[in-house]
Structures are given as C-alpha cells and as structure tokens.
C-alpha cells in the first residue's frame, strides 16, 4: 500500500529533510507541503526545497487542504501551530505525526483530545535510538535504589530556543516512571549560586548550547563510589526525519489514539 504523506512546515530545516525522506522512501507518496504564508518557502518547488530534482509540486499555505488530501501529515513546527493542526486532523480523521518540541502541559492535553478522533504520534525526539535510550533509562531507574542520583545533560546548537530540550524532559520522565515519582515535583532545572547540598530524589537537568551540535544527551546515575552513564549522540538531523517517516507509515492504519515512538518500535 502506498501511504499519502503531507509535510506541514516544509520550509524549515526539519521539514525539508522530511520532504526528502518521503521522496526517497518506498511505500510513500508526497501529497504536498505547506509553510506559514509569510515564509519565503511558499510558492517554491518542493523538490527544490528538499534538495532533489524539481517535482512540479509547489509549497502552499493551506494546511487544512493538505490534511484532507493526505493519509498522514508530518510536522515539525511550533507548539501553537501543532495544536491547531492537530485539531484539523481530528476533524478530518487524518493521521498525524508531530515532532514539535517545547509543548506545554496544556498543549499536550489539547493534542491528546484531538487524538480521540485521529491517530497521532507525538514525540519530542523521533530518533529510534533515543526511544531505546528512554526505555533503558526507565529500567535503570527502576533497578537502582534512590541512593543513586539522576542527572541529565544535553547539548544542542546555538539556535535552539527551548531548554531543557524536549528529549531531556522525555528522559527525565522515563527516570521518574522508573522511580515511581512525579517529574515536576522532583525536577531541578539548573543550579546557580549557593544551592546547598543536592536534594534527595532530585532529577537534575543541565543545558549546553553552542555551535552546530545536532543533539547530545547523557543520563548519569551516580552513587558513592560509582557512576553509570547512558549516552545518545545524533550527528545528522536525517535520523529524526527517518524516524518521523517510519512513524507515518506505522500510524497510517491505526485507530484514533495518542502514540509515541516507543509504540512504533513495539516498546510501548
């Protein structure tokens, strides 16, 4: 079966990579792409945006029409836009893959409500390796007693606008599940000045920004006399596009519901 895939936000860095990946993946057919009306991508050939030969398809700005013409849409945009588009997908019954980061609790709840009427894959990181890392972090947190402190360190390029990264928070949630605790109540998002001793049960976060780093994450479990570190390093953004397209092919025939990449891999 050929899955008709549309790309929302196709003028951005990730959107262009998704366009290219859809074009190169067997079983996919690109139905079109959209961008915000005020971006220079609108009107450009989708092949040119993707860095492949011209396709004859032009980037548009009507997300509703694209959603209605597709089996699945993929987007890496903004939290506000993703919530709006999820509502359009719910109305059309179109499957949706969302890789947008920086979503707040209320925005995630809104996407969850949309998932009652359409199948939606929501993931702050579409990397298959990060999904496996989160599974390992949860297992380690469950196996190691509370005397093991948990710290999460992430580094991204200088242009990233949110911190901690969405992936770091996903890893923190995995550690919290393993410990049977609530992450917001135990998260320590940065330290500065005379902080005093580390609080018992804290899950610490540290964010580094610089250069063109695609994404690096390390989860450290530390206790007296020893440490365990679990790392993931992304060197090419294409891994996120490949994960998103894999999710699109998987979710195309699923029933309405909110899914994650762990479900795509059979780890959910």
Image: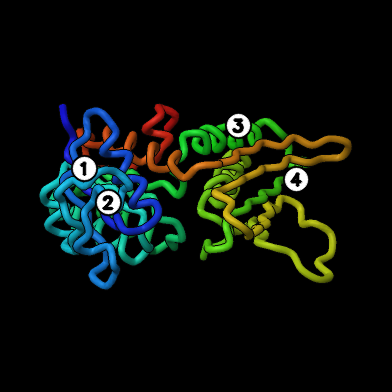
Q: Which residue is mark 3?
A: 139
Q: CA distance from mark 4 to mark 2?
A: 49 Å
Q: In terms of depth relative to the viewer, which is nearer, 215 or 86?
A: 215
Which image quadrant is residue 23 in? top left
Q: Is residue 200 above or below residue 242?
A: below
Marked residue nearer the N-terminal end (4 or 1): 1
Marked residue nearer the N-terminal end (1 or 3): 1
Which image quadrant is residue 265 in? top left
Task: Residue at 82% x, 40% y: name it.
Answer: 223
* Residue 88 percent across, percent down from the top left: 18, 58
In what quadrant of the picture does the N terminus appear? top left
The residue mark sitting in front, 4 or 1, is 1
The residue mark sitting in front, 4 or 2, is 2
Q: Which mark, by number, is residue 48?
A: 2
* Residue 109 percent across, percent down from the top left: 36, 58
Q: CA distance from mark 1 to mark 2?
A: 18 Å
The residue mark sitting in front, 1 or 2, is 2
Q: Label 4: few (<14), some or many (≥20) within 10 Å?
A: many
* Residue 268 percent across, percent down from the top left: 42, 32
Q: CA distance from mark 1 to mark 3?
A: 35 Å
* Residue 139 percent across, percent down from the top left: 60, 31
Q: Which residue is mark 1?
A: 5
Q: Is residue 208 above or below residue 122?
A: below
Residue 183 in view? no
Q: Which residue is mark 4?
A: 149
Q: Is residue 166 toward the left or the right of residue 149 in the image?
A: left
Q: CA distance from mark 4 to mark 1?
A: 43 Å
């Amino acid at each position: 079966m050929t899955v008709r895939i549309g790309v929302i936000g196709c003028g951005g860095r990730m959107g262009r990579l998704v366009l290219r990946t859809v074009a190169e993946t067997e079983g996919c057919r690109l139905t079109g792409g959209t961008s915000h009306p005020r971006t220079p991508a609108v009107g450009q050939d989708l092949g040119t945006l993707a860095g492949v030969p011209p396709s004859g398809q032009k980037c548009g700005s009507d997300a509703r029409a694209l959603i209605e013409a597709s089996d699945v849409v993929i987007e890496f945009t903004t939290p506000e836009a993703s919530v709006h588009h999820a509502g359009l997908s719910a109305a059309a019954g179109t499957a949706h893959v969302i890789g947008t980061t920086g979503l707040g609790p209320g925005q995630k709840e809104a996407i969850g409500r949309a998932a009652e009427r359409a199948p939606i894959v929501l993931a702050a990181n579409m990397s298959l390796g990060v999904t496996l890392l989160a599974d390992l972090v949860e297992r380690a947190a469950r196996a190691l007693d509370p005397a093991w402190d948990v710290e999460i360190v992430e580094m991204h390029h200088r242009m990233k606008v949110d911190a901690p990264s969405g992936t770091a928070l996903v890893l923190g949630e995995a550690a919290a599940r393993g410990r049977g605790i609530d992450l917001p109540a135990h998260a320590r998002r940065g330290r500065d000045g005379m902080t005093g001793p580390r609080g018992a049960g804290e899950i610490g976060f540290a964010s580094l920004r610089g250069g063109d780093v695609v994404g690096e994450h390390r989860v450290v479990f530390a206790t007296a006399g020893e440490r365990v570190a679990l790392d993931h390093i992304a060197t090419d953004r294409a891994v996120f596009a490949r994960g998103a397209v894999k999710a699109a092919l998987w979710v195309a025939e699923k029933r309405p519901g909110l899914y994650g990449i762990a479900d795509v891999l059979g780890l959910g």
